């Protein structure tokens, strides 16, 4: 069954979180961490999103 459409509001602030399956690590090395940060920077530049804060742990991340 498809996921329901999410409600979006102009100028809203969202909390985005994702984690590895079965709590597996998504970041294992410093290179993984750098890749994540570079990817977020590239996406923010392309989309015009604002990232006020982020936290990157071994098995999950949060973006605000």
Image (spheres, helix red, strand yellow):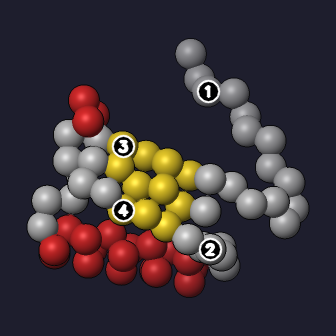
Q: How many numbered marks have been drawn onto this rendered protein structure? A: 4
Q: Is residue 63 left or right of residue 35?
A: right
Query: Which quadrant would residue 1 be assigned to in this image?
Result: top right
State which tag comes first along the sequence, 2 or 1.
Answer: 1
Quarter occupied by the C terminus: bottom right
Label 2 vs label 4: CA separation?
Answer: 14 Å
Q: Position of residue 7 (x, y in %)?
A: 80, 41
Q: Is residue 2 left or right of residue 59?
A: right
| Mark closer to the observer (3, 4) | 4
| Mark closer to the observer (2, 1) | 2
Q: CB atoms at circles 2 and 4 under 8 Å apart?
A: no
Label 4 vs label 1: CA separation?
Answer: 26 Å
Q: Nearer the viewer, residue 46 or 54?
A: 54
Q: CB atoms at circles 3 and 1 under 8 Å apart?
A: no
Label 3 vs label 1: CA separation?
Answer: 18 Å
Q: Residue at x 29, y 41 (%)?
A: 20
Which residue has dot 3 on it?
19
Which residue has dot 4 on it?
56
Q: Residue at x 43, y 46 (%)?
A: 18
Label 3 vs label 4: CA separation?
Answer: 10 Å
Residue 52 marker: 2
Q: CB atoms at circles 3 and 4 under 8 Å apart?
A: no
State which tag comes first along the sequence, 4 or 1.
Answer: 1
Mark 4, Cα crowd under 10 Å, few <14 / some 14-19 / many 20+, is some
């Amino acid at each position: 069954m498809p996921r329901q459409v999410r409600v979006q509001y102009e100028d809203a602030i969202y909390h985005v979180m994702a984690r590895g399956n079965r709590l597996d690590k998504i970041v294992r090395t410093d290179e993984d961490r750098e890749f994540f940060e570079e990817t977020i920077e590239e996406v923010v530049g392309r989309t015009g999103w604002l990232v006020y804060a982020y936290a990157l742990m071994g098995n999950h991340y949060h973006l605000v």
